[in-house]
Image (cartoon, grey):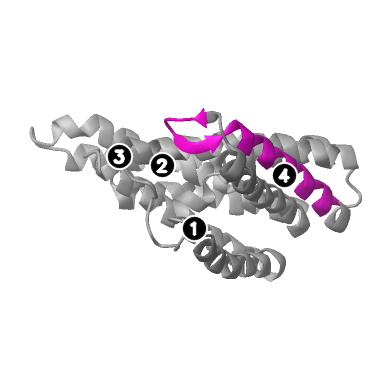
Amino acid sequence: MSLRKRTFTALPLIGILFVVVKYAPDWVFFLFGQAIIVAALVEFYNLAERKQLLPQKIVGCVMALLVSLTFYFPAIPLEVALFGGLLLAAVYFVVTFNTIEKLPFFPASFAVTVIGMVYISFPLNFLFRIRSEAGPFTLYFLFAVIFLGDTGAYFIGKPFGRKKMTPIASPNKTWEGSAGGILFALGGAVLARTLLLPEVPLWLAAASGVVVHAAAQVSDPLESLFKRAVGVKDSSNFLPGHGGFFDRIDSLILSGPLFYFIVKLFWK
């Protein structure tokens, strides 16, 4: 993958992200996040279709947005949205999977449609909660840890990587690259704390960066397992040099909620 192509795509994306996180009203940031969630979810369902699992995309996206609404409207309990989504899926599948020919596809189709809501929509909405409750600088901290950590893993792992870390999920990932990612994430955490969040104790910011990026290093190959299972390298080609939206948000699926809980429990 060309570094020039990756950089050419990444720079405008980072610029857009910076502006939206810092200056957009809550409702704009929320809608921006929903667009990314729906795009990633559709790519997830497209991967499932390659295994003839027949996910119901529209139903899955509606379920995902129901969960998202609980983050924007705290008065709506999450359990209500989860039950509403499950009820919607139940009615849809009972009505539409009504022939003997469709019956063999039901279990996998139902499961993969529902799991998209839990796997993508639920965790990614914590980014909205981080911004709304702790401010944009806290979200910048998370992005600095993830982006610089990924950069370190690439630049250390590519020339020095020898020992495979997850040979099935991500054949190119190595323990040397993982260590480089942790070091760069640590540097990103210290830098972001110094420039943006001086009120956070340095040791706490550093520890948060290490723990959060460790979670990201699990989240990334987890997403890769879905791609390897269907024999593709990227979830789509929408973002030149970076694959698809599902590829770009994979590290945040586990690290985003974990960071929110760290901030909620230890930073305040």
Q: Earlier in the sequence, mark 3 or mark 2?
A: 2
Of labels 3 and 4, earlier in sequence is 4
Q: Is residue 115 magenta?
A: no
Q: Residue at x 41, y 50 (%)?
A: 41
- Residue type, numbered disc 3: Val
Disc 4 residue type (three-letter): Ala
Residue 247 is situated, as x and y percent measured from the top left of the image, at 47, 50
Gap between marks 2 and 1 measured at Cα:
14 Å
Picture disc at residue 116: 2
Segment colored magenta:
165-193
* Element on which disc 1 rests: helix
Residue 156's image quarter? top right
| Residue 65 visible in the current orientation | no
* Residue placed most toward the observer, 180 or 95: 180
Q: Main secondary structure of the magenta part?
A: helix
Q: Residues within 10 Å of mark 1 (few under 14, many from 20)?
A: some
**Residue at 55% over, 40% down:** 78
Disc 1: which residue: 36
- Dot 3 and dot 2 residues touching (CB under 8 Å): no
- Tell which tag, 3 or 2, sits nearer the viewer: 3
Q: Is residue 185 above or below residue 1?
A: above
Q: Are marks 3 and 4 in contact (CB under 8 Å)?
A: no
What residue is disc 4 on?
A: 185
Residue that badge 3 annotates? 230
Residue type marked 1: Ile
- Amino acid at dot 2: Gly
Query: Residue 72, located in which quarter of the rendered image?
Result: bottom right
The residues bearing labels 3 and 4 have C-alpha atoms spaced at a distance of: 31 Å
Q: Are marks 2 and 1 in contact (CB under 8 Å)?
A: no
Element under label 2?
helix
Q: Who is closer to the viewer here, 76 or 198?
A: 198
